Amino acid sequence: MLRAAVLALLAATLIILVSALAVWQANEPVQTLRTPALEAVPEAVRPAPEPREESRFAKMRTGSFQRPPRVPEYRVLEEEVNQDGNTRAARLLVDTRSRSEADYELITRDLKARYAGYDAVSAEFTDTADLLGYNGGALIFNTPDGAYYMGYIYGPPNTRGYYVQAAG
């Protein structure tokens, strides 16, 4: 019973406060919104970026660029190319039914040959016949600059020019 009385008192207080606020605002004149004048956006003044000096490693190549004799069936579903200064990179989404790391390595060697003109390539392996998920990946670094682009700050981590990992 006491609880109901307290709730009724709170409700009445709230109604009085809202009413007082409404009366107080009613005495104020209503202000209309003014649309600001539109002005032309000034063109950004920015000097053109200076061409980067070619890296001393630009002509060095990492690993073999020969295609393997047998490659499991695969298809590139998505390709995203990125140019960062003098470093050219690509990110690939590769569809294949293969699941073994050995098969992924053969596909990676084939991709390394196909994308020999790139410094760095990353590939994610999936199988669209199943649920579209991550089955593994590969990092391909064709040049020391490509390895640096991928985060290997001390140079390529191996002499093959790629790193392959199967998930699970």
Image (spheres, helix red, strand yellow):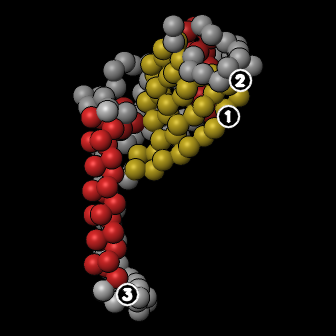
Secondary structure beneath dot 2 equals loop
Q: Quick one: 7 or 69, which is closer to the camera?
A: 7
Q: Residue 53 in the image: x percent, y percent?
A: 30, 55
The residues tagged by marks 1 and 2 sit, at their Cα atoms, a distance apart of 10 Å
Q: Earlier in the sequence, mark 3 or mark 1?
A: 3
Single out the mark in the foreground, 1 or 2: 2
Q: Image height check: is 100 above or below 25?
A: above
Q: Earlier in the sequence, mark 2 or mark 3?
A: 3
Q: Quick one: 30 or 114, which is closer to the camera?
A: 30
Q: Residue 2 in the image: x percent, y percent?
A: 27, 34
Q: Which residue is mark 1?
A: 77
Secondary structure beneath dot 1 equals strand
Residue found 27% across the figure and 42% down from its top: 6
The disc labelled 3 sits on which kind of residue? Val
The disc labelled 2 sits on which kind of residue? Thr
Q: Mark 3 and mark 2 in contact (Cβ < 8 Å)?
A: no
Q: Mark 2 and mark 1 in contact (Cβ < 8 Å)?
A: yes
Quadrant into which the N terminus falls: top left
Q: Quick one: 123 or 53, which is closer to the camera?
A: 123
Single out the mark in the foreground, 2 or 3: 3
Q: Quick one: 91 or 113, which is closer to the camera?
A: 91
The disc labelled 1 sits on which kind of residue? Leu
Single out the mark in the foreground, 3 or 1: 3
Crowding at label 1, few (<14), some or many (≥20) Cα neighbours within 10 Å?
A: few
When asked about the image quadrant of residue 7, the answer is top left
Residue found 30% across the figure and 29% down from its top: 152
Q: Which residue is mark 3?
A: 30
